Image (tube, helix red, strand yellow):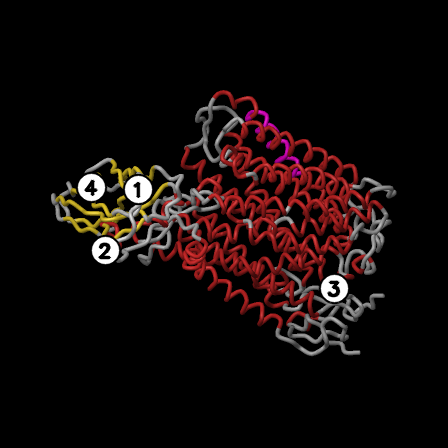
Amino acid sequence: MTTATASHDNHDDHGHHGPAKGIMRWVLTTNHKDIGTMYLWFSLTMLFIGGTMALIIRSELFQPGMQLIEPEFFNQMTTMHGLIMVFGAIMPAFVGLANWMVPLMIGAPDMALPRMNNWSFWILPFAFGMLLFTLFTEAGAPNFGWTFYAPLSTTYAPSSVTYFIFGVHMMGISSIMGAINIIVTILNLRAPGMTLMKMPLFVWTWFITAYLLVAVMPVLAGVVTMMLMDIHYGTAFFDAAGGGDPVLFQHVFWFFGHPEVYIMILPAFGIVSQIIPTFARKPLFGYASMVYATSSIAFLSFIVWAHHMFTVGLPLQTELFFMYATMLIAIPTGVKVFNWVSTMFRGSMTFETPMLFALAFVVLFTIGGFSGLMLSIAPADFQYHDTYFVVAHFHYVLVPGALFGIIAGVYYWLPKWTGHYINENLGKFHFWMSFIGVNVTFFPMHFIGLAGMPRRIPDYALQFADFNAIATVGAFIFGFSQLIFLFVLIKTIRGGEKATDQVWEGAEGLEWTIPSPAPYHTFAEPPHVK
Amino acid sequence: MNSNSPQPDEQSGHKPNNTALKLVIAAVAMFGFGFALVPLYDIFCEITGINGKTGGPVERVEQWVDTSRTITVQFITTNNAGMPWEFEALQEEVEMHPGAWTQVKFWALNPTENDMVGQAVPSVSPSEAAEHVQKTECFCFDQQTLKAGEGREMPLIFSLSPEIPSHVKKVTMSYTLFDAGAFAK
């Protein structure tokens, strides 16, 4: 048996027993667990920064009229909130979970490209440092919305747009490197006997997500490069005066943007598909159909982008094509929801904190899916477009969808990482506060959206006042509840009831065969999967 | 990919392979594909006929004139934000038979004290009529340079092809004028 592992690097010289000491451990580390931990802390930091921006937005919207901030700053807040949550909180959190769990779930000693892994993490603080510092410049931060439509983001952009472009380039490179690493790890480092169709679903969903990342993050890099050239080098990709077309921006952006939506939800599907069988004490219902459904969703995500653009003046045939293609996504998504529910059917369920978040995910993500179906109806979308109904829709899929998935995953694997169970009472308190907060925040937005309140506007007509006030109260409940999460995390890291190796009674998989807390090096000798 | 899998398995063999390199190439190719989308959208829309853009210039051919139908063609002019020129169509609308050639005139005047370059961008409504608009001459084909205070009549010679769908009774041709100083040729 060969002893070669993927983590033969500098700090292994210190021995295979534990990490190096001091700050340089974190700067130089190539250990998948260290890097996963750094990704997760980074994304939690970004969650709090982006969340603070959300609370600034909601404070201004508590009452009609302008009271707290200038409209220009309001635009910067909506833009930065979106960018930071999408690229800084949700995506790095999933990469962090993948770093921690993919090697453990497939029986690999580390990620396949550990040094690149270090780079892909350490690019991120610089990318977001650059993006955030624009807040303190005279021009102010980017203010053109997270979708940065041209010509708002080119002809009419603040000068800080160039920092934004380079920030996007850097985080794109980071994501692509992370995705390549995950694919190479999954393809090459699986333990003997771990065939593709035996892989845990979290690994499967990440495998597919990584391909999406490799396919579309370069297109995002392309579109911001075109912006850069339009702004500084006199090209006219998006300027009609020079023969370009602003609608082209939207087509190229959403060619990236729609698969991006699935990049932010597929790993959450995977997490939930791990958690529900554990706490229902039944194997996942329809494993193979889950894999095929995820692949179908990934494929369909490439041919639905123009449903974001129903109102730009598309020809009728195009509207119909994108409408039907979009509705088609409901089928594989429905298969997934059906399988989760069937897994629970007649299972011996218990409701520990990770299960509560996973259940809330299934219910609330489905609500977000249904509002998505409403939006997919092209003629109806003319009313919903750019209203709070859209805001309600994508927050339902991203907050109780992606974010609850991440939180569920963190609670699920935290005992394996730290060796301690969480305090269940505190965990449940966090869950219920988050669950109530998220619904009080986002459910009323459906109503004000249908009634016609436009998104990204700091003021609104009087008739929207009550629901906006309710949403703001909900936002503060939700936002401050996340401090409970932080408290639980720190408390569990510092101590708590000792976790068993299997951690959860119904848990199955390679990650539960190693000790809790997981040793610094695992699977130096590959396990055999039956 | 730089490490040997400790044990071969049926999926991945045990030799070092170049998965990472392939993926890097794929990422670089997708960056290129992003730029390729710029012409590809145009080509795709042209092939499928969903472009909504008018082409030209075309050779003037004498074609069959469908005198049984009369279509009203309206002209609309718009100045893009910040474009100070006076810009108008000298006739609000014309009535024409499909297949017949018509000349209309537009007027532009540069009221500023600087020489300027303008570019008009056409648009046709309903979009299904766009592919049936044939232009032999249009001020929108080229940039228009006007000296300070200069005004000019600008011609448009066009026809609607006899194949234009019979339910189209009215066509609106709209021109938006942009300040093209930054792109002057």
Question: Where is mark 3, residue-wise?
Answer: A196
* Closer to the eye: label 2 or 1: 1
Tell me which amino acid carries mark 1. Met
What kind of residue is marked 2? Ala
- Element under disc 1: strand
Host chain of mark 1: B
Distance (Cα) linking label 4 and label 3: 66 Å
Q: Could you tell which of marks 2 and 1 lies nearer the N-terminus?
A: 1
Q: Is residue A397 above or below residue A235?
A: above
Label placed on residue B85:
4
Relative image position of residue A208 (x, y in whole percent): 65, 58
Report the residue marked by disc 2. B184
Observer-side mark, 4 or 3, equals: 4
* Image location (x, y in percent) of residue A285: 80, 50
Earlier in the chain: of badge 2 and badge 4, it is 4
Q: CA distance from mark 1 to mark 3?
A: 58 Å
The residue sitting at 67% across, 52% down in the picture is A267
Pointers 4 and 3 within a single chain: no
Is there any visible trace of residue A469 in the rendered image? yes
Q: Is residue A276 left or right of residue B169?
A: right
- Label 1: which residue? B173
